Image: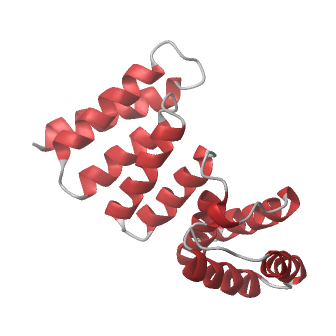
Amino acid sequence: MQQVDVYSIEKLVTTLKNANSSQEIHAILESTLLHSGHLAELIKLPDELIVKVEQEALRLFGQEVYQEARSYFQFLATSRPGFAMYWIYLGAACMKLELYEEALRSYGIATTVAPDDPRPYFFSAYSYSQLKKNDQAKLCLHQVIDLCKGSREWHKLEQEAVQFLYQINEGE
């Protein structure tokens, strides 16, 4: 693990707090990731800073600026590796950029963090189908259906998974 002195951590936090634009935040985050690898190994960022980065990531994703959103979610997922939604959003940004293998890695981590959440399995199925790996896509969809069974919360996703499975089977 790379060692970072306290001065460097304080400087990073201050720099992020004082950033005035999404371009500034993006450049800082990208530079930090390039130099440190995994932020979670280096520092514990204040929650208010994470919220600021998350809001910007969601804004960019909503505006279909997927490359920048991907960088933000990579930063967030690395900073808070136990929070599955960051991995799911990172995978979604990768899917929008047609980086399906990278999306699958993110969804794989999300399933490890939150094995009872059917969403990363569903999105993995889509990524696998885009890679023409229909057998893996079907396995993921069966997992979604199993996780959603009897759940009011996931009823709609279960229906989508059944429909998607039908489409894959029809296409073969």
On the image, the x and y values in percent for residue 37 come to 55, 72
Observer-nearest residue: 6 or 67?
6
Residue at far left of view: 172
Q: Quadrant of the N terminus?
A: bottom right
Image quadrant in which you'd find residue 100? bottom left
In the displayed structure image, the side of residue 163 where residue 110 appears, left or right: right
Residue 136 falls in image quadrant: top left
Q: Residue at x 47, y 57 (%)?
A: 91
Q: How is the image coloured?
A: secondary structure
Total numbered badges shown on the rendered structure: 0
Q: Please give the name of the residue rendered at 83% of the width and 65% of the height, measured from the top-left corner.
A: 49
In the rendered structure, the answer to whether residue 144 lies left or right of residue 53 reads left
The percent position of residue 115, horizontal first and vertical second, equals 48, 32
Q: Is residue 60 above or below residue 153?
A: below
* Residue at image point 90% right, 82% down: 18
Residue 43 appears left or right of 37: right
- Indicate the quadrant containing the C terminus: top left, top right, bottom left or bottom right: top left
Residue sitting farthest toward the top: 150
In this view, 58 is above or below 30: above
Q: Residue 24: name its quadrant.
A: bottom right
Q: Is residue 89 left or right of residue 121?
A: right
Q: Position of residue 125 (x, y in %)?
A: 32, 44
